[in-house]
């Protein structure tokens, strides 16, 4: 498809904190979304990257393709205003900017007040703004820096919401907070919607059949989250691996403390463990496409925004979901016989090597992939955005 659908701009501005070559989930999410918008609806994206390249870096962007990109020469309001003015001048109709927001992406302290002025100025000159809140604001315990920053971050969140013609988030808890803030605001209410977050390591069109996969259990994600999983649930993880007849536990992601990994994980898991380290997205995709189950320790309420969960589901990998803290498993997961989330209790309750155990794992993998295709894929993200993009662009 080459012409944009009715009511849509031919080009969408996407503002992200970082982009390739930086390893950044927001940048990858924005790019996947852009590809889906262009492929299925003819809407191309122009990326504006708020953080400049470091001296040793080179921009990692295709020389040819449907999208364009500007990486600001300096952080802050001056460079962003200059770029937005250029885009406004080039647009025959009011341009739409999609802001991918997480406070710490635009400010080291998580307090990007300068961004509010830029968006207010952009709207005052005819632009439209939609915001995808990947985060709202931080919480912290006294007397941490996060605790003292939280009040200012809340102010920025409320102001950003007021500046947005439409807003999205991937988390139901965040959604409730956004709707409450919207109702409390002085301006007219805006569309506030739930959106899935797609995989950052690919979306195989036809994942490998479950029966043909290696007996591999993947542990993928940031080092801090993997470390938490090993520390809190290492014994349960090993018990499940042995119960399932797992031949390899694949640790995938950067290793920031090799000594800790060896003394705390390597010693416990022995020959089962293979540490792959940080890999390009395509290589992660190959590994996941040949894995049976993937483990993650995540707050249950945030599973919908987890890029790791999305990656597992996109590759039809069964999701072994461990709690992050002491939260109680939600009823929709606890009662979801046949659902996509697996627990240690459920798996260990089935006889080792049994047909029922293998069928449950295959069922969870298939259910997760269906859930992903319908709610979390890049195309599903695009379909969720489209009505709001039409509405705010055509609004007077």
Image (cartoon, grey):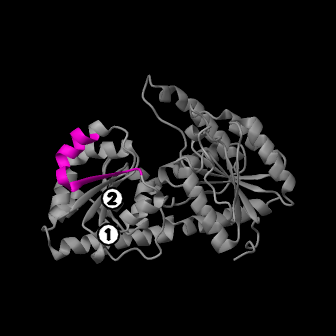
Query: Considering the numbered disc 2 on the image, is that residue within a helix, a strand or a loop?
Result: helix
**Mark 1 surroundings within 10 Å by alpha-carbon count, few (fewer than 14), some (14 through 19), many (20 or more):** many
Q: Residue furthest front?
A: 56
Q: Nearer the viewer, mark 2 or mark 1?
A: 1
Residue 19 screen position, x and y as percent? 60, 49
Q: Which quarter of the rendering shows the C terminus? A: bottom right
Q: Is residue 19 visible?
A: yes
Q: Is residue 308 magenta?
A: no
The picture places residue 103, in percent across and down from the top left corner, at 58, 39
Mark 2 to mark 1: distance in Å?
A: 17 Å
Residue at screen point 74% across, 71% down:
4
- The magenta stretch is 261-278
Give the residue at x 73% y 63%: 391
* Residue 272: in magenta span: yes
Residue 320 visible? no
> Viewed as shown, does residue 376 lie left or right of 84?
left
Q: Secondary structure at mark 1?
A: helix
Q: Where does label 2 land, which residue? A: 331
Name the foreground residue: 292 vs 143.
Answer: 292
Specify the principal SS of the magenta part: helix
> How many numbered badges does the structure rendering display?
2
Label 2 Cα neighbours within 10 Å, binned few <14 / some 14-19 / many ≥20: few
| Picture quadrant where residue 81 is located | top right
Look at mark 1 in the image and give the residue it sits on.
364
Label annotation for residue 102: none
Q: Earlier in the sequence, mark 2 or mark 1?
A: 2
């Amino acid at each position: 498809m080459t012409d944009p659908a009715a009511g849509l701009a031919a080009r969408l501005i996407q503002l992200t904190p970082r982009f390739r070559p930086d390893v950044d989930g927001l940048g990858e999410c924005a790019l996947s979304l852009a590809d889906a918008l262009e492929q299925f609806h003819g809407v191309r994206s122009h990326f504006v990257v708020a953080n400049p390249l470091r001296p040793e870096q080179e921009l990692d962007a295709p020389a040819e393709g449907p999208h364009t990109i500007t990486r600001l020469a300096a952080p802050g309001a001056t460079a962003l205003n200059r770029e937005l003015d250029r885009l406004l001048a080039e647009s025959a109709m009011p341009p739409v900017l999609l802001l991918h927001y997480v406070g710490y992406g635009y400010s080291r302290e998580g307090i990007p007040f300068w961004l509010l002025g830029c968006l207010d100025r952009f709207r005052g000159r005819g632009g439209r703004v939609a915001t995808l809140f990947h985060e709202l604001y931080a919480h912290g315990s006294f007397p941490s820096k996060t605790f003292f920053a939280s009040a200012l971050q809340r102010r920025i969140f409320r102001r950003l919401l007021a500046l947005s013609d439409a807003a999205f988030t991937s988390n139901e808890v965040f959604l409730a907070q956004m709707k409450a803030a919207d109702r409390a605001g002085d301006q007219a209410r805006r569309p506030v919607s739930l959106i899935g977050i797609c995989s950052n390591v690919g979306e195989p069109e036809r994942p490998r059949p479950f029966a043909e996969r290696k007996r591999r259990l993947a542990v993928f994600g940031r080092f801090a989250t993997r470390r938490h999983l090993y520390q809190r649930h290492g014994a349960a993880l090993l018990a499940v691996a042995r119960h399932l007849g797992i031949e390899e536990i694949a640790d995938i992601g950067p290793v920031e403390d090799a000594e800790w990994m060896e003394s705390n994980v390597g010693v416990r898991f022995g020959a089962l463990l293979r540490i792959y380290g940080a890999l390009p997205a395509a290589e992660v995709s190959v590994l996941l496409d040949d894995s049976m189950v993937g483990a993650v320790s995540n707050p249950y309420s945030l599973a919908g925004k987890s890029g790791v969960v999305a990656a597992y589901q996109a590759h039809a990998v069964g999701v072994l979901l461990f709690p992050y803290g002491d939260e109680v498993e939600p009823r929709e997961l606890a009662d979801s016989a046949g659902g996509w989330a697996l627990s240690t209790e459920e798996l260990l309750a089935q006889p080792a090597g049994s047909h029922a155990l293998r069928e449950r794992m295959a069922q969870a993998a298939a259910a997760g992939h269906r859930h992903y295709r319908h709610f979390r894929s890049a195309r599903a993200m695009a379909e969720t955005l489209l009505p709001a993009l039409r509405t705010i662009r055509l609004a007077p």
